[in-house]
Amino acid sequence: MTTPVYLINTDDKLQAQIRSFGLLPQTEAPQSGEYLLAGHEGIALCRAGEKGQVRVDFAGGAAQYRRQKGGGELIAKAVNHTASPTVWDGTGGLGRDAFVLASLGLHVDVFEQHPAVACLLADGLRRAADEDAETAATAARITLHFGDTCTLMPQWAGSAGRPDVVYLDPMYPERRKSAAVKKEMAYFHGLVGTAQDEARLLAVARAVAKKRVVVKRPRLGQFLNGEAPAYQYSGKSTRFDVYLPEYPEHG
């Protein structure tokens, strides 16, 4: 089912962006479920009958804190950022980890297959590039690809070359207690669900990557597809499982 988009005073450019993801603007908000609200502040994910909104914001909030105060050390180690790897994020979502990696100076190709999520992410990147000079350079290092991840990544590898690292953050039940985080994830889960073909996702990632596949998990969470990694980087609440590629390229 296509996610409805309710427009309020939007310009032609924003409407064109919405339509580029196969989403059709509507004149009224739906009576139930999740929908996108597009207005002068950008695009937000909403739920009918509730006041909360989820917007991709790389200039403020948690993204600003991570950019200014740190917090990306563990993910930086997991992708071996000192080697300046090319990184593909196969589960783009709201783009937060991709933005952290790009803030380290890495170029990140982000793949997102859900049209509404891709639209939210594209809008966040647009605002980061247009409205905040501090984030514009970081946003410029991120390229968004819309479509089926497991199909697009091999195709893109064939034309652009394989990446050093494929990064995956598959959805899992959110355990943090923050009310705001719980509401955000509830909206997100309501929009896209939680079912993913973990076996296919991991297999494609390992076939594409030249150096490693990095999978983000809860510290005590199960392995992706039940497959044990080669090694791990663990923090207080999160760990990064590292898998070796199917066709490694050395050097």
Image: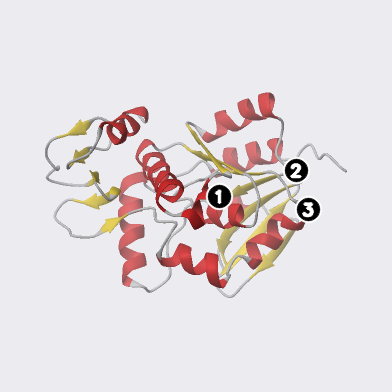
Q: Amino acid at mark 1?
A: Ala
> Where is residue 117, by image quadrant?
top left
Residue 216 or residue 60, whichever sits in front:
60
Q: Residue at x 50, y 57 (%)?
A: 134
Residue 114 or residue 224, whichever sits in front:
114
Horizontal and vertical percent position of residue 203:
65, 39
Distance CA(mark 2)–CA(mark 3): 17 Å
Q: For mark 1, does the 10 Å Cα neighbourhood hold few (<14), some (14 to 19), or many (20 or more) residues?
A: some
Distance CA(mark 3)–CA(mark 1): 20 Å
65 shown above or below 211: below
Secondary element under disc 1, as helix, strand or loop, is: helix
In the image, which is nearer the foreground, mark 2 or mark 3? 3
Q: Amino acid at mark 3?
A: Ala
Q: How is the image coloured?
A: secondary structure
Horizontal and vertical percent position of residue 1:
28, 33
Asked if marks 3 and 1 touch (Cβ < 8 Å), the reply is: no
Horizontal and vertical percent position of residue 213:
68, 48
Q: Which mark identifies residue 25?
A: none
> Which residue is label 2 attached to?
245
Using the rendered image of the protein, determine whether residue 130 is visible from the camera's viewpoint: yes
> Which residue is label 3 attached to?
83
| Lower position in the chain sequence, tag 2 or tag 3 | 3
> Which residue is label 1 attached to?
137
